[in-house]
Amino acid sequence: MRKKIAKFSILPLAAGSIFFSFSTKEAANLDLENYSTYDLELDYTVPDVRDELIPDFEISNTSPFLGKSYVGFKEALAFKESRGDYKTINDYGYLGKYQFGKGTLKLVGVYDTIGFLNSPALQEAAFYANASRNKWILQRDIKRFAGKTINGVEITESGILAAAHLAGPGSVKKYLRSWGAQAFSDAFGTTIKTYMKRFGGYDTSFIKTEKNARVNFDKLTS
């Protein structure tokens, strides 16, 4: 008798489970219908990446796929210099993400090296100012040599600017005007040719030529 009761007692539970299962699905479908976006006018807000290219020196997260843009150029160069570390100082005293020497920083109006290391925005501003200054100094050489081949490497504006960051614009002038005969290498053995090749082909038209480029401290945000 107990066995029969046990068998029949299962039926209400099973029926309840089936009913609950169907009712749950129906409720879910109703919820989906209530939240449907069908036939609605949707306004998707997408960040304008062009804002990241304007030199207001705000630090923002950018896509790792930067291509051949100015941002791609400076980030590739920074990775080679310091792996993108704003705080680093190498064995020769070069500072920050782009490994600036103290003398170069003074040329763009930066005298406080401690403040420089603690301000990513200041480092980005210094990089742009230095690149603008180098582009002004080398503008004739860029026009003359871009598209030419020296020591097996095609010369491009971005390659010239990267080499100037490494060796200074004077050394780059000597290299170009001697058609590669007057070479330069830094303390680690890195050459102008290496930078010309590695950083060639980027679009650096965003960098404006400026004779006395200085950091604009009024525009810094951090």
Image: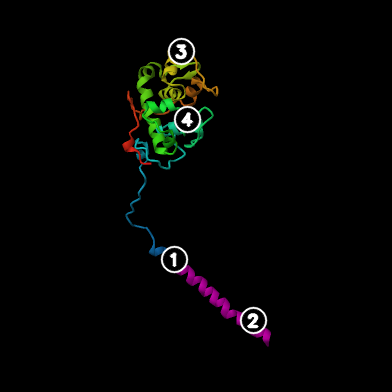
Query: Which-is-in-front pick, marks 2 and 4?
Result: 4
Magenta region includes residue 105? no
Query: Which residue is identified by label 1?
Result: 29
With respect to residue 140, does 78 lie above or below? below
- The residue closer to the viewer here, 217 or 54, is 217
How far apart marks 4 and 3 lie (CA) works out to 27 Å
Tell me residue 209's x, y (percent).
Answer: 33, 25
Query: Which-is-in-front pick, marks 3 and 2?
Result: 3
At mark 4, the secondary structure is loop
Disc 1 residue type (three-letter): Asn
Disc 2 residue type (three-letter): Lys
**Sequence-first tag of 3 and 1:** 1
Residue at image x 40%, y 41%? 59
Query: Which-is-in-front pick, marks 3 and 1?
Result: 3
Residue at image x 42%, y 16%? 173
Residue at image x 44%, y 27%? 102
How far apart marks 4 and 1 lie (CA) works out to 59 Å
Disc 4 residue type (three-letter): Gln
| Quarter of the figure with the N terminus | bottom right
Q: Main secondary structure of the magenta part?
A: helix
Query: Which residue is identified by label 3?
Result: 179
Tell me residue 61's x, y (percent).
Answer: 43, 42
Query: Which residue is identified by label 2?
Result: 7
Q: To which quarter of the image does residue 66 belong?
A: top left
- The residue closer to the viewer here, 26 or 213, is 213
**Sequence-first tag of 2 and 4:** 2
